[in-house]
Image: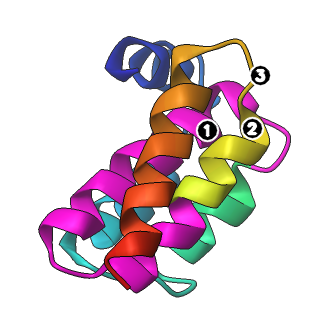
């Protein structure tokens, strides 16, 4: 995943503003200044949005915020093809996050 983000960044397809939103999301921001903003800007880029949604979902589980992680796993599922590791991992993580409500 990091390679995909790096390649997109070097081609100008992942901007400094998106990186800033990503850093805010990593710190715990879910609104338009964090994951919400980054997710919106990555609409139409399932190759970036799906894996990043999964990554941030895992991060939010570690921050003990499963309610915030669930929509991220749902976004990852929505971007992933059913026959991929991303889909399987996201499905499992969503199920586990939902159990821990």
| Image quarter (top left, top right, bottom left or bottom right) of the N terminus | top left
Which quadrant holds residue 55? Answer: top left
Nearest to the eye among marks 3 and 2: give it: 3
Whether residue 36 is situated above or below residue 76 in the rendered picture: below
Q: Residue at x 58, y 70 (%)?
A: 71
The residue carrying pointer 3 sits among few (fewer than 14), some (14 to 19) or many (20 or more) residues within 10 Å by Cα, namely: some
Residue nearest the observer in this picture, 67 or 27: 67
Q: Is residue 38 left or right of residue 42?
A: left
* Main secondary structure of the magenta stretch: helix
Residue 17, horizontal then vertical, whole percent: 49, 58
Relative image position of residue 34 (x, y in whole percent): 44, 75
Disc 3 to disc 2: CB gap under 8 Å: no
Q: Are marks 2 and 1 in contact (CB under 8 Å)?
A: yes
Secondary structure under tag 2 reads helix
Compute the Cα span from label 2 to label 1: 5 Å
State yes or no: residue 7 in magenta. Answer: no
Q: Which residue is mark 3?
A: 81
Describe the element under mark 1 as helix, strand or loop. helix
Q: Out of 35 and 93, give the one closest to the viewer.
A: 93
The residue at which mark 1 appears reads as: 50
Decide: is 67 above or below 92.
below
The residue that appears at 62% across and 42% down in the rendered structure is 49
What is the span of residues highlighted in magenta in the rendered image?
43-72
**Residue that protrudes farthest toward the right in the picture:** 44
Which residue is most to the front?
A: 99
The picture quadrant where one finds residue 13 is top right
Measured in 3D between alpha carbons, the distance from the residue under mark 3 to the one under mark 2, in whole angstroms, is 7 Å
Judge whether 63 appears above or below 7 on screen: below
The residue drawn where x is 27% and y is 82% is 65
| Residue 66 in picture, x, y percent from top left | 34, 77
For label 2, the residue is: 79
Instruction: Judge whether residue 65 can be spotted in this image.
Output: yes
């Amino acid at each position: 995943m990091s390679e995909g983000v790096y390649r997109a960044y070097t081609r100008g397809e992942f901007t400094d503003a998106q990186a800033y939103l990503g850093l805010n999301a990593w710190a715990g921001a879910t609104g338009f200044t964090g994951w919400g903003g980054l997710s919106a800007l990555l609409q139409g880029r399932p190759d970036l949005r799906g894996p990043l949604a999964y990554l941030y979902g895992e991060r939010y589980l570690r921050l003990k915020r499963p309610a915030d992680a669930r929509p991220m796993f749902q976004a990852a599922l929505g971007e992933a093809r059913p026959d991929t590791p991303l889909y399987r991992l996201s499905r499992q993580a969503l199920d586990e996050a939902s159990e821990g409500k």
